[in-house]
Amino acid sequence: MLVAVGASPAAEQLVRWTHRLAVALDCWWGAVYVESTAILSEAEQQQLSRVLSLARSLGAEVITMTDPDLVEALLQMALQRNVTQIVIGKSTRRFHRRLFRSDKWMERLLQQSGELDIHVVRFKEGLSGTPSPRRSIATGSTLQEYLLAVGIVFAVALIGEYVEFLVGFRAIAWIFLAAVVVMASFVGRGATLLAAGLSALAWDYLFEKPLYSFSISNPEDRILFVIYFVVAVTLGQLTAKIRAQEKAEREREERASALQWLIEELAAATSMGEMLKKAAQQTGDVFKGEVAILLPSSPGRLTVDPSGVFEIPEHEHPVTAWVFEHGQAAGKFTSIFSATPTLYVPLASSGATLGVIGLRLRQNLPLTVHQRNLLDAFSQQIASVMQRRQMQEIAEKSNILAESERLSKTLLNSISHEIRTPLAAIQIATTNMHEIGGPDLTPNQKTMVSEIHEASERLSRLVGKVLDMTRLEAGHLKPNFDLCEVRDLALLAESETRNEFRKHHLTLDVASDLPLVRMDFELMLRALTNLLSNAAFHTPAGTEVQLSAKVENGAMQLVVADHGHGIPEASLPHLFEKFYRAPDAPTGGTGLGLSLVKGFVEAHGGQVKAENQASGGAAFTIRLPI
């Protein structure tokens, strides 16, 4: 949906009406201002700024474009933005429509709209907001320009009195015409029209016979008078129009150059700090003010970046926080926190607000429409570059972390393979010492050999876990599926962890009618033994641990439950993370066992979860598809 707005106070009604309809339809909407060659007064510029600021605050995208044909501009913008509905306003006063010919362009818009829906909204008359008395709405000329036009006509008439006898009275008309054309290059249309009319009357009254009367006796002179008046008015208007267009083009070129300059400076910056410093400097130079940039340092808190040139007072911090939270401008020249001497604009890109830019302007008048659009373009460009640099930094950190992870995996894999050989030699040596030299060993020596053997077995299990984790993360661990007996799996897991449960009570509760389950028996055995070892390691001696197996909701469910102290609530979401250990966990664990269990189970298409039991203790549940 698109609403066409102008400098009229009634445009605020149109904006609010369109906002309500857009909210009801849940659609995108924009406010478009089509700039023509007409010169707006200061009051009209301020009114237009208020209208566009209102549209921004209500969530509209503000669009400004230059086109002498309002209808063509609206239809072109509707085509570019895939607009389906256009909202325009009309006055209820007939003389108003006749005077400004509003019916003509409305009729053209309705005829050329095609499949577009046109909403014509009636607005109330007598709204607040009157133009400045020093400038005419229709002519765009100041009082000084009108006085200048009268003075120039008087000066040319005075000169003509002295040169008429040399050049003739008809040549005086061309002198008047030249004066009108030259004057049109630096005054408004109203003053040009006044000069054309006064010069025609002055020539008729002072130089055309009969003198000092407005009657013309000679038919040739009558034709000359009419031609002169038409030529003077036409040339004056064309010259004024060309001058207005030239001024508008020059201003557009200055705005485009300023934005291009900013883009080049930001692109040349080598760091975030340098980029922000250049952004603050360029913004201050273009808008003739002081700039401060605020960035989020922690959730809900903004700090002033060193690139700015002034400090934000304490009482303005709520304003900056509001701008950052709502993504809308506030402060000076706005309707929100208008008493604040600083204008704050959000640095937003891709729907995310990255910071706030504060601008202390030296001018006392509100920003014009073009200045505000340029400021929005500056803020969006700065935010866009900030976002790209942040993404580059994140990508660089990710690459460094990925490379570090790859090197650590390679190192662990290499070390693990190298350690397995001496470990195997140590285990064989301790076994031989028990079997061959057992009778000759003293009790202390037997104890030392047993400790060495247990330590080597523990280290061997650790190396195996590291290798398993490396294969899991590399995607090299592929389950070898086969139909297996769950009872055999539970009995073998109990047998392999018998030594670890010497001081605990392990019971089995396996249903008798369990079906065969398609799984990798070896991988599931290691997953189950890891859970049992974890329960024995983290519960006090004498704790009862239960391993149960049953079918529930179409899945095989294996549960390892204990009656220990349970798991801290803060640790539950992190239990299956690699190398994670709870804060109060006993020393000696590696934090790999549960992450391996998760990897083994998910390789089977299953799930594993941990939870605390209402009766006390923890329960780890494995669910495998049948």
Image: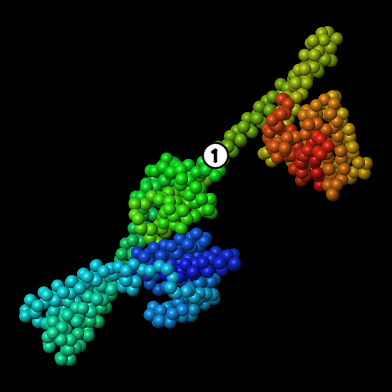
Q: Nearer the viewer, residue 246 or 486?
A: 246
Does residue 19 lie above or below 294 as drawn?
A: below
Amino acid type of the residue tagged 1 in the rendering:
Lys
Q: Is residue 611 visible?
A: yes
The residue shown at (80%, 40%) is: 621
Q: Which quadrant of the figure has residue 214?
A: bottom left
Does residue 333 lie above or below 304 as drawn?
A: below
Judge the density around disc 1: few (<14), some (14-19), many (≥20) Cα neighbours within 10 Å: few
The residue shown at (75%, 19%) is: 426
Residue projecting furthest to the right: 512
Colour theme: rainbow
Q: Which quadrant of the figure has residue 522?
A: top right
The residue shown at (52%, 45%) is: 391
> Which structural element holds mark 1?
helix
Residue projecting furthest to the left: 165
Which residue is label 1 attached to?
397
The image position of residue 248, as x and y in percent, is 33, 65
Q: Is residue 232 visible?
A: no
The residue shown at (43%, 73%) is: 126
Q: Nearer the viewer, residue 154 or 618?
A: 154
- Residue 375 as seen in the image, left or right of residue 414: left
